[in-house]
Image: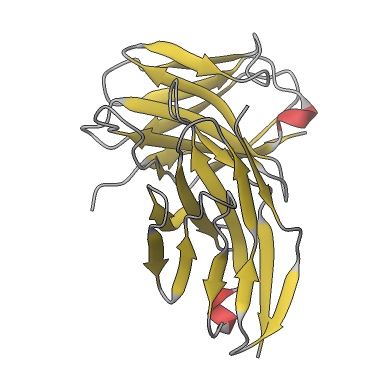
Amino acid sequence: GDSVTQMEGPVTLSEEAFLTINCTYTATGYPSLFWYVQYPGEGLQLLLKATKADDKGSNKGFEATYRKETTSFHLEKGSVQVSDSAVYFCALSATSGTYKYIFGTGTRLKVLA
Amino acid sequence: EPEVTQTPSHQVTQMGQEVILRCVPISNHLYFYWYRQILGQKVEFLVSFYNNEISEKSEIFDDQFSVERPDGSNFTLKIRSTKLEDSAMYFCASSDRNGGPGELFFGEGSRLTVL
């Protein structure tokens, strides 16, 4: 079945460092791909999405490119801030049935001042 | 901006008690979902609901769980006899989908603590 594999955390960075969080997927067909962010004590917020190969999603300085050849959707940000500290979830939208989302395990990011 | 709302935000219950978690999806959405997240762990799919019936459910969604859309606006998740391992954050989501994969809009979640 469809699945998402996400790099283990936690990831600890200094402010202004470069961030990469790896995400790869397995799916039959061509899923839509998403990154969600969860701040402490809050719900899931959509950060960015891409619906087809080579699409780049971007928001708040974060970006991710849908790479069909490597089945990846890595999240990047050039310069992180303390306020980016959160848990980041990669997800795909199943390509059949009810189009439910399948989430990765989440990666906790901690940014130090 | 329309949003998915969930109540209660936090519920504490005794093991064996029934719990109902409520959700008001975005008004023109037709597809509804429940997910759960055990503390610090992954977000897991429980069930999807369309046209007044369950369209897909996971192995987690056993006979202790049920969902209902009683009045055309609310979407509820009932746990008949709670167990300690049901302690988790439960997220409701909805989508309009329009014939293909659409964005899921999530509520803020209901935290369930079973003692």
In terms of image quadrants, where is residue B93?
top left
Q: Where is residue B50 shown, x and y percent of the image?
A: 36, 17
Colour convention:
secondary structure
* Residue nearest the viewer, comparing B101 with B5: B101
Q: Residue at x 54, y 85 (%)?
A: A79
The answer to whether one can see residue B112 in this image is no
Query: On the rendered image, what quadrant is the C terminus of chain B found in?
Result: top right
Horizontal relation, residue A36 to residue A26: left or right = left
Horizontal relation, residue A56 to residue A72: left or right = left
Q: Where is residue A55 shown, x and y percent of the image?
A: 38, 57
Q: Is residue B15 above or below residue A4?
A: above
* Residue nearest the viewer, comparing A37 with A2: A2
* Residue nearest the viewer, comparing A10 with B23: A10
The answer to whether one can see residue A23 in this image is yes
Q: Is residue B56 above or below residue B5?
A: above
Total tally of numbered discs in the picture: 0
Q: Where is residue B74 shown, x and y percent of the image?
A: 34, 26
Q: Residue at x 47, y 51 (%)?
A: A34
* Residue nearest the viewer, comparing B34 with A96: A96
Q: Residue at x 64, y 65 (%)?
A: A21
- Residue, far front: A69
In terms of image quadrants, where is residue B22?
top left
Q: Where is residue B18 shown, x and y percent of the image?
A: 62, 18
Q: Is residue B16 above or below residue B84?
A: above
Q: Is residue B10 above or below residue B84?
A: below
In terms of image quadrants, where is residue B43?
top right
